[in-house]
Amino acid sequence: MNKKIILLFSIVFSSYLPDDFILKTTIGYNSNFLNFSKYEMDQSSGDVSILGDSETFDSHILGNSLKYSKKLKSIPIKINLNFSSINYFQSKNKSSYNYSLNLSYKIKNYNWFKIGYKNSPKVYLKMYKDLDQNNQPLLPTIFNSEKIFVSYSYPLHNNTWIKFQLSNSSIYFNPYFTEYDLVVNDLYLKCFNLLNKINVSYKYILADNVSFKSGLVSNLNDRTYREQIFGFNIKLSKNYKITIFSKLRDYESKNESDVVHFGRWHHHFDIVQRFDRNINDNLKLSFF
């Protein structure tokens, strides 16, 4: 298991803007911002090209987000517009931005119907080898992602409620790595505030490798997979909570010569500890 450390210090400027806007700036540090495994780190001494445009595995971070919320007077609908960006000091490639639009219709307390859209135009993973070209250096792997969702929440008892969500996402890579193109459908269920401090969730994902058999050598292998994610979150105090995720993925390749995906499955387990400290109304410190 490869551990990493994330430190975040946030400043919220809501007091200095109109009521409909919230501007937040986050300064932080990530000890492994490209998510390298321990094996990859150990092997990097002989090939620093895996770092791409970065000189180190870690990086300082500067993030900004602007949120706009407005309740319409004519109909009981709330509009939320979000724009956020994140800059990694060590990597221009890793720096990115996204924007989203959510429409929420409130039926009663804890009872909402929502639809939304999110676009992430450029997301950089890390450096990989293009399987369709021989004797080529490692190339940056970049994709764009679009997501639409619809959700419904309903109260169960007192301040405990449950949410059902269906979403569809498209993930398309740059021309060197189209073999990883996916269309992802998922079902998400989450129960909030059990015993006033516990959240539990379940997500079922079906990711269809839409570029399978599209004509290139790299597209001969099917990368379609199914995944289940179980989540558990407990708030142990006002400022401290623990989140646990268990992810089980199964690939559906029927090609026995596909040594990477045929019969492949893996189980990923995450434990995240978070400590938040409000310095004042505009300053917040978070440790992960």
Image (cartoon, rainbow, N blue to C red):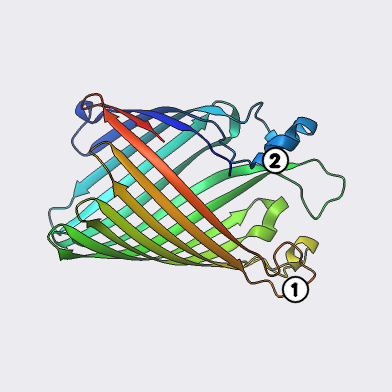
The residue under label 2 is 40
In this rendering, position of residue 104 left or right of residue 35: left
Mark 1 burial class by Cα count in 10 Å: few <14, some 14-19, many 20+: few
Residue at 59% in and 38% down: 34
Q: Name the outermost residue toward the right.
A: 135
- Mark nearer the N terminus (1 vs 2): 2
Q: Is 258 drawn above or below residue 12 in the view shown?
A: below
In the image: residue 22, left or right of residue 229:
left
* Pointers 1 and 2 in contact (C-beta within 8 Å): no
Could you tell whether 246 is left or right of 14 in the image?
right
Q: Quadrant of residue 15?
A: top left
Picture quadrant of residue 31: top right
Q: Amino acid at mark 2?
A: Glu
Residue 189 in the image: above or below residue 195: below
User: Which quadrant is home to the C terminus?
Assistant: top left
Image coords of residue 6 (percent x, y): 46, 33
| Residue 89 horizontal side relative to residue 257, left or right | left
Q: Residue 61: percent from the left, percent from the top?
A: 48, 28
Type of amino acid under label 1: Asn
**11 vs 146, nearest the viewer:** 11
Q: Which residue is depicted at the point 78% across and 63% down?
A: 216
Q: Position of residue 125 (x, y in %)?
A: 61, 44
Q: Is residue 208 visible?
A: no
Residue under pointer 1: 255
The vertical placement of 194 against 98, above or below, is below
